[in-house]
């Protein structure tokens, strides 16, 4: 027998890992730099590592109190009730829970294109269908009310990503509010803030709570993760913050013990490790500015821990960078075959990425000038 027809499902394309590339190239992994998956170049919050070591002997028990403690700490941090925090196996897991809580077979979601692939994948797993709104490179991937509402046609869920992956653009709260006002009562607007700590825009939790002059809303949810600013991508810990009215639904849709004991204990410790988050934000801010200023190609302004660069031929440039030990993300799978996305690294990693990319861009320019000269008629070439 076979699985059901999965022909309209696509596999998630993750950024390439150091071990995988090292094996393929026959190189020592320590000579490679990975700036392909928007991870935290400073590593995990040290307090989280300690908490994992302390909690390791307890993992024969199911994580009941750890889950409750983390939910409660996050509720306090955001000023919402515990029921409004839906812990999950990464923000990806929270996307699944929102799909389970919203979609009936055939319901549609609206997603940005280009955009984060898992919104669409998750909707399809849950028997939903997908339409998209286009963010244009000529408009710096600007996320406007018109772009979203012009494409909106009664979808059950509308995804906004702020900061947006892969471009780094953001959307302000007034625009989110206008979009939520402009959609049906039964439409949930999900603001994915996986990179929220790196941006100087307020969280859309403000709209759920109804603070800072906004009315409280029951049709906006927010996604956050420990994978980026807290450096816990390998643990898989994220959450949705949902309207108060949605609190009851979590128990009906979540996979039992949605986050592991180690993840919850590490998350609790990481939340208190403000120093690590501050150092990470400082590193990211600095790396973004350096890449924007020094790369010899167009770099889009970014509020995330990465930049998008127009290199002309993404797969050729990403491959050439990889051959020289720097792994970046070829954005062809995002529908941007001319762009690579580079994660902000440490000082040295960022310097190496800039130098390597500039070298390759210069070589490619020289090659293309030579090819043009060879192709020109003699009279023109000699003049
Ligand atoms: C926009 C966006 N949302 C969600 C996620 C998923 O994060 P997590 O690691 O918490 O599942 C990512 C991961 O890269 C992302 O880029």
Image (cartoon, rainbow, N blue to C red):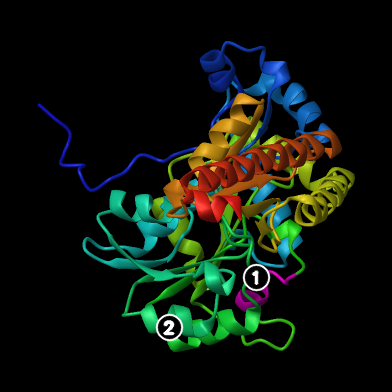
Q: In which quarter of the image is residue 366?
A: top right
Q: Residue at x 9, y 26 (%)?
A: 1
Instruction: Tell me, yes or no, if residue 377 can be seen here.
Output: yes
First in residue order: circle 2 vs circle 1: 2
Residue 213, above or below 242 = below
Q: Quadrant of the C terminus?
A: bottom right
Residue 176, above or below 263 = below
The 10 Å Cα crowd at callout 1, few under 14, some 14 to 19, many 20 or more, is many
Q: In this view, does 71 lie to the left or right of 229?
A: left
Looking at the rendering, the stretch of residues picked out in magenta corresponds to: 201-209
Q: In which quarter of the image is residue 328?
A: top right
Q: Point out which mark residue 119 bears.
A: none
Q: Nearer the viewer, residue 172 or 71?
A: 172
Residue 87 in percent (x, y) is at: 57, 49
Find out whether residue 203 is within the magenta segment: yes
Residue 241 in percent (x, y) is at: 58, 62
Outermost left residue: 1
Find out whether residue 322 is within the magenta segment: no
Q: Which residue is drawn at 21% across and 63% down?
A: 106
Q: In this view, does 308 lie to the left or right of 79?
A: left
Q: Which of 111 and 286 is in front in this view?
A: 286
The 10 Å Cα crowd at callout 2, few under 14, some 14 to 19, many 20 or more, is some
Q: Point out which mark residue 149 bears.
A: 2
Q: Point out which mark residue 205 bears.
A: 1
């Amino acid at each position: 027998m076979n699985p059901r027809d999965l022909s309209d499902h696509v596999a998630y394309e993750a950024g390439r890992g150091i071990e995988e590339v090292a094996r393929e190239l026959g190189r020592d992994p320590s000579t490679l730099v990975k700036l392909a998956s928007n991870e935290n170049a400073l590593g995990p919050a040290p307090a989280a590592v300690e908490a994992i070591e302390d909690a390791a002997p307890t993992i024969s028990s199911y994580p009941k109190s750890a889950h409750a403690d983390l939910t409660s700490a996050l509720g306090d941090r955001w000023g919402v009730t515990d029921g409004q925090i839906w812990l999950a196996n990464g923000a990806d897991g929270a996307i699944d829970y929102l799909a389970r809580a919203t979609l009936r077979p055939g319901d549609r979601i609206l997603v940005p294109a280009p955009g984060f692939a898992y919104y669409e994948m998750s909707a399809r797993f849950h028997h939903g269908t997908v339409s998209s709104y286009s963010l244009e490179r000529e408009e710096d991937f600007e996320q406007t009310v018109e772009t979203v509402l012009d494409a909106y046609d009664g979808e059950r869920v509308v995804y906004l990503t702020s900061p947006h992956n892969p471009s780094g653009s953001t959307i302000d709260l007034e625009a989110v509010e206008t979009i939520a006002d402009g959609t049906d009562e039964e439409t949930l607007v999900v603001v994915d803030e996986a990179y929220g700590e790196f941006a100087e825009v307020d969280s859309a939790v403000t709209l759920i709570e109804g603070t800072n002059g906004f009315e409280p809303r029951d049709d906006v949810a927010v996604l956050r993760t420990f994978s980026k600013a807290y450096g816990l991508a390998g643990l898989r810990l994220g959450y949705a913050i949902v309207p108060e009215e949605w609190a009851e639904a979590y128990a009906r849709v979540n996979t039992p013990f949605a986050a592991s004991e180690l993840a919850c204990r590490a998350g609790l410790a990481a939340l208190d490790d403000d120093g690590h988050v501050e150092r990470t934000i400082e590193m990211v801010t600095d790396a973004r500015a350096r890449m924007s200023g020094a790369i010899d190609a167009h770099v889009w302004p970014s509020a995330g821990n990465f930049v998008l660069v127009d290199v002309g031929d993404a797969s050729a440039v990403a491959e050439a960078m990889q051959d020289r030990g720097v792994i970046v993300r070829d954005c062809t799978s995002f529908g941007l075959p001319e762009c690579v996305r580079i994660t902000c690294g440490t000082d040295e990693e960022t310097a190496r990425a800039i130098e390597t990319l500039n070298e390759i861009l210069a070589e490619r320019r020289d090659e293309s000038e030579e090819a043009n000269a060879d192709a020109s008629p003699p009279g023109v070439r000699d003049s």
